[in-house]
Amino acid sequence: MTTDAIGTHGGAAAGTPPPGGTPLAELRGAGKSYGAVRALHDVDLAVRPGRVTCVLGDNGAGKSTLIKIVSGLHRHTEGEFLVDGAPVRFRSPRDALDRGIAAVYQDLATVPLMPVWRNFFLGSETTRGPWPFRRLDIAAMKRTADSELRSMGIALDDLEQPVGTLSGGQRQCVAIARAVHFGARVLVLDEPTAALGVKQSGVVLKYIAAARDRGLGVVLVTHNPHHAYLVGDHFSVLRLGTLELSADRSEVSLQELTHHMAGGAELAALEHELAQVHHAGAEGPPEGDPCAPVTTGTEEGTP
Amino acid sequence: MSSTARQAPPAPGAPGAGAPVPGGGGSDRARRRSPAVALLARPEVGVLLGALAVLVFFLVAAPAVRHGGSTATILYQSSTIGIMALPVALLMIGGEFDLSSGVAVITSALTASMLSYQLTVNVWTGVVVALLVSLAIGALNGWLVVRTGLPSFLVTLGTFLILQGVNLAVTKRVTGNVATDDISDMDGFDRARQIFASSFGVGGVQVKTTVLWWLLFAALATWVLLRTRFGNWVFAVGGARESARAVGVPVDRTKIILFMAVGFGAWFVGMHNLFSFHTVQSGEGVGQELIYIAAAVIGGCLLTGGQGSAVGPVFGAFMFGLVNQGIVYAGWNPDWFKAFLGVMLLGAVLVNLYVRRTASRR
């Protein structure tokens, strides 16, 4: 599986050729262990320009680990990570940013106490003047932040207000607009709608679509299949650190996606076991290796 | 992308016109804060008002404070605290503490003094070596904090105890005494004294140069904090370390440089002590670190990092100097000094808390 092309996993029957040449970023059989704990194992993922790749999964499925590898916060311990077809090992998020991969995190997208414009340019500040007197070009930064935010449809009266005073959706949008402005080619979004209400989620999803239409490759990490299905082109479902499903939009319906999210294959196995218990009237059987039935189950589980 | 229904006003081209967004429209959180509230929310405004209140109090209670000479003394007292309170405040905004800053001042002075005296070299050699030692202590503190991820409180408590012990033990071993030898007749002393510990006349009043250095450093710190990339990073690493790292801010480097800035401050104050008193008492400095931290906190720096200024600690240090000398000029028992300071610290913290909560309520 490690060397196979993307798209064969789960969607094997369709055998779709990968659309649009070399992916911007690609994981091949990638995995990550924290000491003895294996958080992620043998995962394939491809990010293509102008497409939204959704990574779904329950809590602890390995979603966070996966995007931390892509965004340079963690390093993979197995498999390959390629950017533009060449293997890379990022040492820090700075490396990832330099290669055009920007991440927007659910809880750590912004610095709440800092003004909007400072947040917008944090880490990539515009300066002017020669070295000993090199200083922030505040006017230019405010102007740029304002026009960038407006082009994404966010108008703020006061760019000096701390980001912490914005609503959750607005904060996400500031972070997305920032990533787009700084030339991100791959936008990694970690649960951007998790803490938001329905309306705010809609706003964020609209910006995701806007970013996609600008030709960015978007990785949308979420545990909400409904949100994913609204904007997604490709769906990868993680379960206990491995890939349970990887399918294009044409190969999977929202219902199937929801089913997989709920642990479809495992549920079926559980149902079977419960039936056995009922018949035998014996003690509940101990939990087996959860990975084994899942991986085999997916092949049949996907119609 | 055209303007969206709720978040953007219909005309995206119009610059952010002063008119506040109507609060009833659902997105009241985007409402612009009134200028007065925004001003009060500035961390340094509270301490300015506090300092003025204490000043008025002592101007009334201790008429001697009104004399120029007394003012100069108060400013001098404030400056020796204030020069250290500045880097300590920057470090606090960056989310860290340095409990070793008080004894590090003495370590620096001892290094310069003993090195020059024992090797009989120009005092400037000692001054330069002391600078390197101070910066190295700061870098070590910072490196340990960022590498281990331990709270800086613990790491610097360790260096505080180490330096305290080393100061005493090494001084006794080298000089056979708890104080260093007088270096006032050595080469370069006069020149160094001119820079670190002289005074100049203003309207018939002798003002110490440390006051000038203090204000100069404060202006520099303000500029760095508000107008440079590094300053931006200081706020960011203190406010949300992981967010800062995720957008590419060199968090570890920023923190280490902040610790080294405290080292620089310790060196400067150490040199001032050395060249104004000619000898150094190796057991001193203990407890000063808390005074610096208190001055920064009174100055509106958030103990947990991410907020503060360089101007606030200037007023914070001024309040210290004012109370310290004011009590004497008022003819009260100086034993009350610390009690007075404690009340002031609690008062300042409570006022800051109240102001911040009121101002940031949405």
Image (tube, coloured by chain):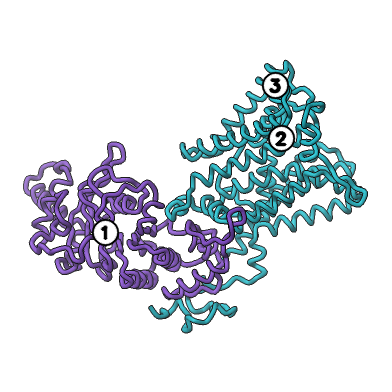
Chain colours: A purple, B cyan
User: Which secondary structure, mark 3?
Assistant: helix
* Label pair 2/1, CB-CB below 8 angstroms: no
Discs 2/1, front: 2
Depth check: A166 or A148 in front?
Answer: A148
User: Considering only vertical position in the picture, is A268 above or below B334?
Assistant: below
Q: Earlier in the sequence, mark 3 or mark 2?
A: 3
Give percent across and percent down for residue A121.
49, 62
User: Which residue, given by chain and number where applicable, does mark 3 sit on?
Assistant: B119
Residue A214, image quadrant:
bottom left
Residue A168 shows in the view: no
Mark 2, residue position: B270
Q: Amino acid at mark 1?
A: Val
Q: Residues within 10 Å of mark 1 (few under 14, many from 20)?
A: many
**In the rendering, at what x and y percent does residue A37 appear?**
28, 40
In the picture, the disc for residue A55 is 1
Q: Which dot, 3 or 2, sits closer to the camera?
A: 3
> Percent position (x, y) of residue B332?
87, 41
Q: Chain of mark 2?
A: B
